[in-house]
Image: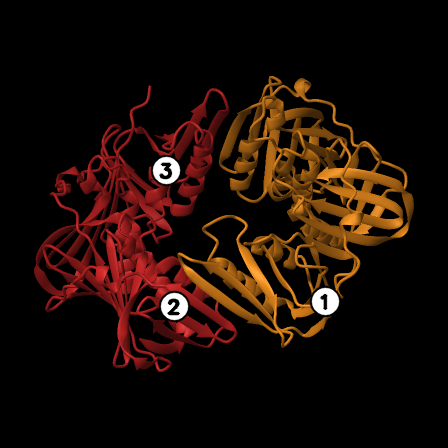
Chain colours: A red, B orange
Amino acid sequence: MNFSINSNVLLNNLMISQKALSTKTPAPYLQGIKLEVYDDEMIMLASNSDISIKISIKDESLNIEDEGEILIPGKIFVEFIRKLDKGIVEFSVVDNSVLKISSNHTNLSLNLLNVEDYPNISFKMVDGPIKLESKVMKSVIKQTTFATSTIENRPILTGVNVKVQDDELIAIATDSFRLSQKKINTTKNYDKMNVVIPGRSLDELHKILELDLEEILIHLDHKSIVFEYGNILFKSRLLDGSFPETSRLLPNEFPVVLKFKTSDLQVAIERASLLSVRDSISSIVKLNLKSNNDVEITSNSPEIGKVVEDVETIDCQTSTSLKIAFSSRYFLDALKTFDDDEVFVKFTGEIRPFIIESKKDEGLIQLILPVRTE
Amino acid sequence: MNFSINSNVLLNNLMISQKALSTKTPAPYLQGIKLEVYDDEMIMLASNSDISIKISIKDESLNIEDEGEILIPGKIFVEFIRKLDKGIVEFSVVDNSVLKISSNHTNLSLNLLNVEDYPNISFKMVDGPIKLESKVMKSVIKQTTFATSTIENRPILTGVNVKVQDDELIAIATDSFRLSQKKINTTKNYDKMNVVIPGRSLDELHKILELDLEEILIHLDHKSIVFEYGNILFKSRLLDGSFPETSRLLPNEFPVVLKFKTSDLQVAIERASLLSVRDSISSIVKLNLKSNNDVEITSNSPEIGKVVEDVETIDCQTSTSLKIAFSSRYFLDALKTFDDDEVFVKFTGEIRPFIIESKKDEGLIQLILPVRTE
């Protein structure tokens, strides 16, 4: 094998591929990046137990003298290419086992992994994939994955449940203390699907979506999912098992509906949470609806002190009093998913889940379970 | 006690003070920041076992209604003030034990520490302190502290030796594998001094010097050192014991003197060091002077592969051949202290220490011990 390519083109694609590199794995070949060069194209492939990434590179700087495929130790390869001077870099394979990389005054000989060991990874493409704006895909991910469980005792909750029916796509995540749901309309009708995608896979996908391409295609069937983003194919493992039915958890009557300036609510809860932050991850704050329809956010630590924050409501529809306590971190996490300057917080009762919504973020519901105090 | 002040003024000074806060200490009062308000001035004081910082704050926004002094739990105080809205914040002490902080819609009650517990910290000022440009002080710190030892078995080597005599100040650091020496001329003559300042104290001082003040005064006597930087006094503990005499370590005859473009040398060694980086902190590279007066930097790992870097010399004065091996990290650390585009690397022999110098960085010498291979 023998080819040359612009080092920057190579590096940009390696930066994407390396997201699928295993760092610790019993299978050394998964620490490798597979390169195939044929005709006028380079195929770059990396995979770990969760995700696989396949990139097709056709660049005018790519010059293939001799075709072939190799498996390169991934991490050191990326680091080396990152440190190369800009310009053309030449690759040639010697004795089927060593890759020679030359550029300017630099020569690296890198021992190759055995490409025969590399598993065959299929990227199943479907007819009529789901088409989304990539910025919509990004917001769906950002608005849901944070609410997945990080504890492995219910593995299914470490994933995001994605359901497609007709012209609607719903993404749901819950760690059983909070729930995020985002509903979007697709431009056309699709077959019914119901899968669970690991939250971490979606976080990696989110990073790749930083490239500024307009659309993403989702090749979804019941057993596999492949995202097609320009010349990149991104495949994620799916989680086995059935995701809990959450629709009945969402309350639909709200005796108390409060409207806030998002930033007012955020800084008040941030400050209130400072007092208890040392005690536990989920520092508890209390919200108390006052008779003047504003609210008081309080936090109390006998050892350290007490915070009282007054937050004005923009609007308040209520037929009852309200005192409720909740995790400040869950509330702040949820609040950050909204793009709107104003949010609604809707309460059913003092020990019932409450939800956050906004006008601008249509289809988005954040639900939080309160905690009982004293 | 009762006063008010602009929250930003308070925060900017707290950010400096907190560098002297203890995080883990058997003495809880060292986790506190002491505030004294008298007349038209606030004195802010923080201290740990290494450094003490005292700041005098006179600001037009400072309005003192009732004088006094208090000791505030430092970390939470800084975090809270950081999250406050901009504007005036009011402070009042209740029952000698609780500090009330009010601003806009926020009220914090913070349990105070007992100010009587706080030790008396003296900042000894001398007549005729040493006066330096603060940018010179910054470069002295940056060029030496990195070479101090991080291992505690010879505590004296964790410090920087500062010697003053007549119109010369010399700073020296060594971990016994490398040595940094910076010599500067002072504008006038000073008494003879010889002290050892903990490297970590100087690193903290370096951060404070980010403020853009022109000058720094050094109040140095044989037992204490206080840096005066605008309204800030920064005191460091000194290390006991005598610093090794290093002058005889510096070679003065150099059969091989090579001149390089600094960046050429840096990237070549960075790339060569990639191969061995997993094996140890001090990855070894070899430098080989070729017959054409350029050099070859090589690194070899039987498992991973081999790097060969050609680096052109700008100038080469040599009467002998040269093959030498050294820690790439030590070399890169040393190289980063130079501001010049070009550096000289001067060799005495293949198993003798070598030095790096540049024209622009007058008074700076970086010395590195080679390692023996095979």
Image position, residue B108 (x, y; %): 52, 29
* Category of crowding for the residue at label 3, using alpha-carbon neighbours closer than 10 angstroms: few (below 14), some (14–19), many (at least 20): some
Amino acid type indicated by mark 1:
Val
Eye-nearest disc, 1 or 3? 1
Image position, residue A236 (x, y; %): 21, 55
Q: Chain of mark 3?
A: A
B213, above or below B128, in the image: below
Residue where numbered disc 2 is placed: A12
> Quarter holding the C terminus of chain A?
top left
Gap in angstroms between the C-alphas marked 2 and 3: 36 Å
Residue where numbered disc 1 is placed: B257
Label 1: state its secondary structure: strand
Gap in angstroms between the C-alphas marked 1 and 2: 40 Å
Image position, residue B351 (x, y; %): 66, 55
Amino acid type indicated by mark 3:
Arg
A203, above or below A83, in the image: above
Q: Nearer the viewer, residue B200 or A34?
A: A34
Q: Nearer the viewer, residue B30 or A163?
A: B30
Gap in angstroms between the C-alphas marked 1 and 3: 61 Å
Which of the two discs, 2 and 3, labels the residue nearer the N terminus? Answer: 2
Q: Chain of mark 2?
A: A
Q: Nearer the viewer, residue A120 or B316?
A: B316
| Horizontal side, residue B155 vs residue A54: left or right | right
Q: Residue farthest to the front?
A: B374
Residue where numbered disc 3 is placed: A329
Q: How many marks?
A: 3
| Horizontal side, residue A76 vs residue B3: left or right | left
The picture quadrant where one finds residue B3 is top right
